[in-house]
Image: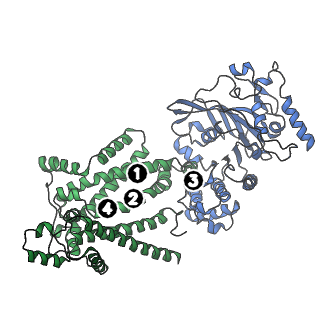
Chain colours: A blue, B green
Amino acid sequence: MDDLLLKVEDLRVSYHTYAGEVQSVRGVSFDVKRGETVAIVGESGCGKSVTAKSIMGLIMDPGEVKEGSHIWFEGKDLTQNTKKQWRDYRGNECAMIFQDALTSLDPTMRVGKQIEEVLLVHGKASRAEAAGKAVEILRRVGIPNPEIRVREYPHQFSGGMRQRAMIATALVCGPKLLIADEPTTALDVTIQAQIMDLMKELQKDTGAAIILITHDLGVVAGIVKRICVMYSGKIVERGNSADIFYHPHHPYTWSLLNAVPRLDLENKQSLMTIEGTPPDLLDPPKGCPFCTRCRYCMPVCREEEPPVTDFGDGHEASCWLQDERAPRTDAEFMHNLKKQENKD
Amino acid sequence: MQTLKYILKRLVEMFITLFIIATATFFLLAAVPGDPLESRADRLPESVRNNLYLKYGLDKPVLERYVITMKGMLKGDFGESVTMPGYDISRLLKETLAPSARLGLQTVIIGITVGLLLGVLAAMFRGTWIDYLVIFFSVLMISVPTLIFGLLLQKYVAGRLHLFPIIGWPKGKDLWLGGWKYTVLPTLTGCFSYIATYSRLLKTSMLDVVGQDYVLAARAKGLSEAQVIRRHVLRNSFIPIITSLPMSVAFALTGSFFIEKIISIPGFGRYYVESVQSRDLSIVLGQTVLMAALYVVVVFLVDILYTLVDPRIRLHK
């Protein structure tokens, strides 16, 4: 499989704190093909960002990528990388966009310099060329008057422009993989759409694969091909976006979908929330991690980890409801969904 | 244009500040019972005493003296010293400022350099024995008064080991660049507090900056740890240092009473405290106003420096 770019295999990451070992990521596996967009969706604290940081090699003390985890990038295992190899890879082969562009740009350095820095550190351009390239990439991401803007500081940019500048910084070396960690969370809705459009457009040009990390299923709709739903350090359901949106099988995915605001619902019902909080990762539950908040929880869910059920075409979910002995309870949800579709 | 307006505005403010400080100093000293001539004049015959009071203008009512003093001040004349006949503030400065300034400069340069280096070390090796060692010495240096360090050094390093002279200060042509052995002990004594202050200040500031998102972003760009520290962490950590730095220099230049007293350095700081004790108005006023002027100018410079280090700050709104 030559078009396989990234393969994460049984990734486990723990943070060693005074309270004990926090198991942030507990055995995550997924892969990304060249040029495709994969979304990792889940609520705060489910291990999305930690997964992203592991792929960038940015897990620092007291964090630890556990023995037995593998991250294959173009057939090479990143977990065996030396510091030097990591440096050559970061920003060059794989770049990352952070959630809050305001705090992710150095306030005391001109925007142009921050872009040039990436080119220079990877030897992609001489000092003289780098300045020109910085202007060029800023124009590419849609910043007006880039010749003037490169000389300005981040605080002189608006929120959306800062995120554009971040994207420019990430893409200037032409990485094969772009990790976008909640790239639109800090922006208002109209700007969110612009930024997502920009990323889609740039992806078409550069052919970079994108891992889009978000807590908002609304953001990923129509942009990504495949979605992984993460909960409590594990992937609970994965599949292509049509499957996840129209035929979800995990109760957590149902709840997430219900939490997306919609304009087209007949009775303007208030947004659904997911009751309760995720389990404490200091001491993860032995059964299904979602069992304490799940409406359809059965005795077996508390005792044993649910097996992975394959629905074909890469659509998988880990839930006991899919066991043949379980009662068919997703009817209520499917019914809801039908009603909406009829309405459309 | 706007910058010029801002600077003018600041100059007027500085002038008003100095005026208030001078006025406050005058009335505070005037409010203290007795006067500088009291102890000296008591034993003198009536007529001589009256002449003395007349000479220094101490026979006039307070408000009249205030007007006279202020008028003189505007012309740069603070009046003659009462306790040191023949001296006025400019002569005193000429004779005492050089030793204080040299001691201060040496202290500040060594103290801040060592302090900042230790701060960087402590931040980079946080949680290791290097960090704990730096913290231990900082706390020790900041808790033990300068005076104690001075006396201990004097007793053991100079007294027992005879490594350096116990007291004294280079004079004449050695005033600025010679007689180093005399300056070692007082410089050491003085620089401890700077080492302690600056190592802790920089360490705290660096740890704060290291946790910022842009440092993570810099790492994600592929920069090495050294490059991250040099290009992003240090520059941002220095913002709080910049405010304290000029203040420390100004503070050091005006001398230290304790060190000058125990090492017998003919410095400015010593005379300042002594003239307050003897209520020598013209000298106290002169020194206070000059020091206040120095500080006010330094504060102004700090504001300008800020705009150079941190582009987010502009002089005018």
Please tell me whether mark 1 sits on a helix, a strand or a loop: helix
**Position of A177 relative to A31 (above/below):** below
| Pointers 4 and 3 within a single chain | no
Sequence-wise first label, 4 or 1: 1
**Position of A252 relative to B27 (above/below):** above
- Residue B93 image offset from top left, x and y in percent: 23, 71
Q: Chain of mark 1?
A: B
Q: Disc 4 residue type?
A: Phe
Q: Disc 2 residue type?
A: Ser
Q: Chain of mark 4?
A: B
**Position of B196 relative to A128 (above/below):** above
The image quarter in which residue A224 lies: top right
Q: Chain of mark 3?
A: A
Q: Quadrant of the C terminus of chain A?
A: top right
Mark 4–mark 3 Cα distance, whole angstroms, equals 46 Å
Q: Mark on residue B244?
A: 2
- Residue B61 image offset from top left, x and y in percent: 25, 75
Q: Which residue is mark 4?
A: B251
Q: Which residue is mark 1?
A: B201
Q: Which residue is mark 3?
A: A122
User: Residue pushed farthest right?
Assistant: A342
Residue positioned 29% across, 64% down in the render = B253
Q: Disc 1 residue type?
A: Leu
Mark 1–mark 3 Cα distance, whole angstroms, equals 34 Å
Mark 1–mark 2 Cα distance, whole angstroms, equals 10 Å
